[in-house]
């Protein structure tokens, strides 16, 4: 159960990573996004890789270039999804965007590794049409249904018309695209870790250290857009000086810590869960990320004064998701 526990802890950490935003007073999106992306996608992974992997550069020289390209294309896809997500919040609203992203991303991230096999140990994952695969398919449908209920409850909680900017249809298509692309963060690891882990461990790196190095070389694609986009917004708005706000800067530093802990927990958990780890790890991590995000909303008062019917709708969704996650954890223990 250690692998499942790590994936669950990773989901909690990722769900908490956005919580500091609620306590910021001066920073806008571009400020915290720039600091968070630069530290979590560039600085921290490389610091860990250098510290934990002997002969890091020597190991990386023996990895096929195709592994780097594949990983960074997936990472870039995830980076694009992040930008599209922010734009969709404005065009079609937060609840609809979140529902579409998760409703599409969950089944893609859980089921695709059983259809198109990952690298290393994930290459022996069971078929989607095996008994285990069909069980995961059923659990995925439960997760998607629970996310739909959450999106409905969130929409009712807002109780206001969505202020759209530009075409609603365009926003809808952008959200659907982001739903597919957001799985790039998980797939960057799943489809590239095999040759990278082999090269790193052969040169003395422990498994956790090797995983840090895998993230270091797979995240630049995502960093490219996630760092440059908010930087461009700051330069265009001439608000770079706002970065010097002490309170908000310190709050922002918590975000990359949570994010990197989530990456390491998810990757280690996936590998500990064996051949099915790519699917189970993603499902457990995403489920707990969603539940933790809702918990943060409750803690910060988002649900105060909401109709009881809407609260019951959200509670029903949470119960369904907890049931599906529990069965997923049981599958790993078998």
Image (cartoon, rainbow, N blue to C red):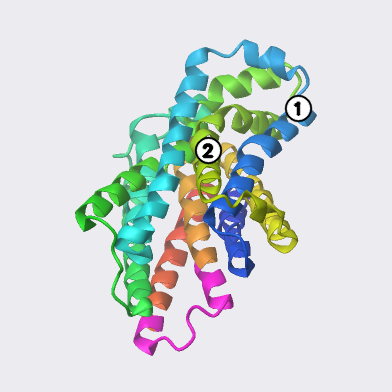
* Disc 1: which residue: 50
Residue at (56% x, 70% y) in the render = 296
Residue 22 vs residue 60, the one in the foreground: 22
Residue 309 lies in magenta, yes or no? yes
Mark 1 nearby-residue class (10 Å; few <14, some 14–19, many ≥20): some
- State the extent of the magenta-drawn residues as a range: 294-311
User: Mark 1 or 2, which is nearer the eye?
Assistant: 2
Left or right, residue 98 beside residue 296: left
Residue 315 vs residue 81, the one in the foreground: 81
Residue 303 lies in magenta, yes or no? yes
Residue at (49% x, 37% y) in the render = 225
Q: Would residue 48 be seen by someone viewing this image from the given angle?
A: yes
Mark 2 nearby-residue class (10 Å; few <14, some 14–19, many ≥20): some
Residue 9 drawn at (x, y percent): 62, 55
Per the image, label 1 sits on a secondary structure element best described as helix
Residue 217 vs residue 318, the one in the foreground: 217
Residue 100 drawn at (x, y percent): 32, 56
Using the numbered discs, state the Cα–Cα distance from disc 1 to disc 2 in whole angstroms: 24 Å
Per the image, label 2 sits on a secondary structure element best described as helix
Residue 162 drawn at (x, y percent): 30, 69
* Disc 2: which residue: 228
The label on residue 193 is none
């Amino acid at each position: 159960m250690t692998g499942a526990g790590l994936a669950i802890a990773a989901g909690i950490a990722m769900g908490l990573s956005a919580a500091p935003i609620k306590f910021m007073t001066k920073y806008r999106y571009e400020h915290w996004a720039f600091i968070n992306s630069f530290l979590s996608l560039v600085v921290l992974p490389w610091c860990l890789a250098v510290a934990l992997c002997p002969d890091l550069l020597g190991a990386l020289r023996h990895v096929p270039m195709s592994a780097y390209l594949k990983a960074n294309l997936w990472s870039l896809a995830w980076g694009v999804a992040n930008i599209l997500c922010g734009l969709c919040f404005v065009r079609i609203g937060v609840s609809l965007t979140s529902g579409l992203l998760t409703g599409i991303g969950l089944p893609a991230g859980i089921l695709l590794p059983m259809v198109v096999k990952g690298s290393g140990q994930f290459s022996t994952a069971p078929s989607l049409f095996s008994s285990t695969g069909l069980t995961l398919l059923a659990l995925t449908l439960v997760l998607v249904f629970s996310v739909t209920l959450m999106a409905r409850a969130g929409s009712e909680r807002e109780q206001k018309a969505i202020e759209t900017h530009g075409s609603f249809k365009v926003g809808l298509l952008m959200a659907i695209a982001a739903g597919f692309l957001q799985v790039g963060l998980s797939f960057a690891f799943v489809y590239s870790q095999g040759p990278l882990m082999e090269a790193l461990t052969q040169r003395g790196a422990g498994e956790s250290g090797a995983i840090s190095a895998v993230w270091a070389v797979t995240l630049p694609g995502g960093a490219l857009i996630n760092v440059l986009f908010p930087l461009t917004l700051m330069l265009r708005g001439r608000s770079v000086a706002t970065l010097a706000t002490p309170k908000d800067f310190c709050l922002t530093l918590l975000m990359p810590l949570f994010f990197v802990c989530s990456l390491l927990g998810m990757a280690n958990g996936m590998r500990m869960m064996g051949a099915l780890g790519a699917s189970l790890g993603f499902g457990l991590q995403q489920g707990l990320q969603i539940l933790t995000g809702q918990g943060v909303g409750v803690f910060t008062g988002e649900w105060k004064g909401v109709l009881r019917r809407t609260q019951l709708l959200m509670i029903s969704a949470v119960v369904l998701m907890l049931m599906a996650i529990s069965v997923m954890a049981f599958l790993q223990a078998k």
